[in-house]
Amino acid sequence: MKTSRHRLLEIGREIVCKQGFGGLSFGALALRAGIRKASVHHHFPAKADFGAALIALETEALTSALAAAEGDTRRGYLAMREFLRERREQSGGGTALDLLTSLSADAPTLEKESRTALASARELVVRRIAAILQTGRRDRTIAVAGDIEEEARAVLSQVEGAQIAARAAGDIAVFDRTLATLEKRTAAH
């Protein structure tokens, strides 16, 4: 059985991904969890604490994903397609953003420590993409023209933009069309 704290983070993550950090309230969180608002405050004294906990949880997951990417023996294009599939899935059919993209959009509303932790988490995503691109460059399954890190940042920006465009349109097909050029870099393999 999951702890109340963990359950609150799951619910909060869903709210933040769909409505942004600004759209999260402890009242709504308590209502969705079926508990009193005071119980939310027991686990998270302030909204800033909740944001920091979300970022910490995401950082753990990203650290695992990075380790997996660095040890991945699949061909680069397969790893990239898996990454894009994950991000597409996190787009909730065009109704949501992945957690880091959502928090990044609301970064000015976060406490300084949370913005720093968010920046570190985003760097983990860049490193994961860079590992995938490096594998793809090595096995010649992804066309990588320049510096791996610059390419990874460009891929992240393109994926985030695709999520935002799909959410704005309420249509996951927009995500797919936006990433068509990225898919073409791996389509021949």
Image: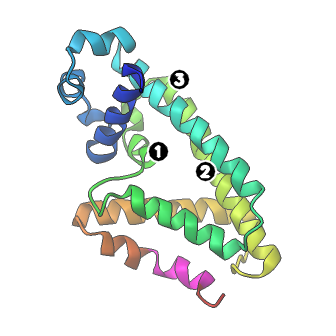
Task: Decide whether residue 185 is among the magenta residues.
Answer: yes
The image position of residue 114, as x and y in percent, is 50, 27
Asked whether the residues under the numbered discs 3 and 2 touch, taking CB atoms below 8 Å apart as contact, a structural biologist would say: no
The image position of residue 6, as x and y in percent, is 42, 26
Quarter holding residue 130: bottom right
Q: Residue at x 64, y 53 (%)?
A: 126
Q: From the viewer's perspective, is 75 left or right of 4?
A: right
Magenta stretch, residue numbers: 179-186
Q: Residue at x 61, y 37 (%)?
A: 120
Q: Amino acid at mark 2?
A: Val
In this view, the residue farthest toward the right is 138
Sequence-wise first label, 3 or 1: 1
Which residue position holds label 1? 100
The image position of residue 142, as x and y in percent, is 69, 78
Q: Amino acid at mark 3?
A: Glu
Sequence-wise first label, 1 or 2: 1
In this view, the residue farthest toward the bottom is 188
Asked whether the residues under the numbered discs 1 and 2 touch, taking CB atoms below 8 Å apart as contact, a structural biologist would say: yes
Quarter holding residue 73: bottom right
Q: Which mark is residue 121?
A: none
Q: Is residue 99 above or below residue 49?
A: below
Which residue position holds label 3? 113
Which residue position holds label 2? 125
- Local crowd at mark 2 within 10 Å, few (<14), some, or many (≥20)? many
Q: Is residue 3 above or below residue 101?
A: above
Task: Decide whether residue 30 is among the magenta residues.
Answer: no
Quarter holding residue 106: top left
Q: From the viewer's perspective, is 95 left or right of 4?
A: left
